[in-house]
Amino acid sequence: MKPSQENYVPSHNGLVVQFVSGDFRSSLVAIRSYKAGELITPLEGLTKGPKRYTSVQCGPGDKDHIELNSDLVYINHSCEPNAAFDLSSPNPEYWHLRALKPIKVGEALSFFYPSTEWDMDQPFKCECGAPSCIGVIKGAKHLSLSQLAARQFVNSYILELISQRDGQFAGKLQSRL
């Protein structure tokens, strides 16, 4: 059953869904503040699943997708995000969502979709309004190395795929991202 304001119970401490009518308008909002670098939540209750708008890519393969099975599916995209899904560890027990910059009470969480997604089935026109907005969000496959290098965080498997695509080592950027 799709959550609604009538039957909603938050799945993570410190976060709530702000429901807005219309497709893809709801968002996940902080109800406490977070410092840059702070762990927001470990990723738990994940299940492997097909590539869908509710899944997040967790590795380099076409079938490497997980369903978050929680309010985390309401985190929207921004070209200048305040959070990141860190899925770089080979051990899923260490996967987490962390703050990239300070997040204030009442602020919507956002992440840079190409930081996890190589090639999206449903590209969309970005509405983030950030100065560094890339326009249409299609996945990291459609971005240059310099466009990804300008981001605060990109998962290591995305950097590996960029290295394979471009024939140059992109992993050196990981320490800067």
Image: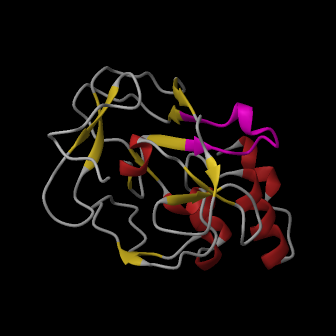
**Which residue appears at 39% of the width and 42% of the height?**
71
Q: Is residue 73 left or right of residue 115?
A: left
* Quarter of the figure with residue 148: bottom right
Residue 143: percent from left, percent from top = 59, 74
| Frontmost residue, 163 versus 123 | 123
Q: Is residue 93 left or right of residue 132?
A: right
Q: Is residue 11 above or below residue 17?
A: above
Residue 138: percent from left, percent from top = 51, 76
**Which residue appears at 63% of the width and 49% of the height?**
47
Residue 58: percent from left, percent from top = 68, 55
| Frontmost residue, 89 versus 103 | 89
**Which residue appears at 72% of the width and 72% of the height?**
62
Residue 76 is a magenta residue: no
- Segment colored magenta: 85-97
Residue 90 is a magenta residue: yes
Q: Is residue 128 above or below residue 19?
A: below
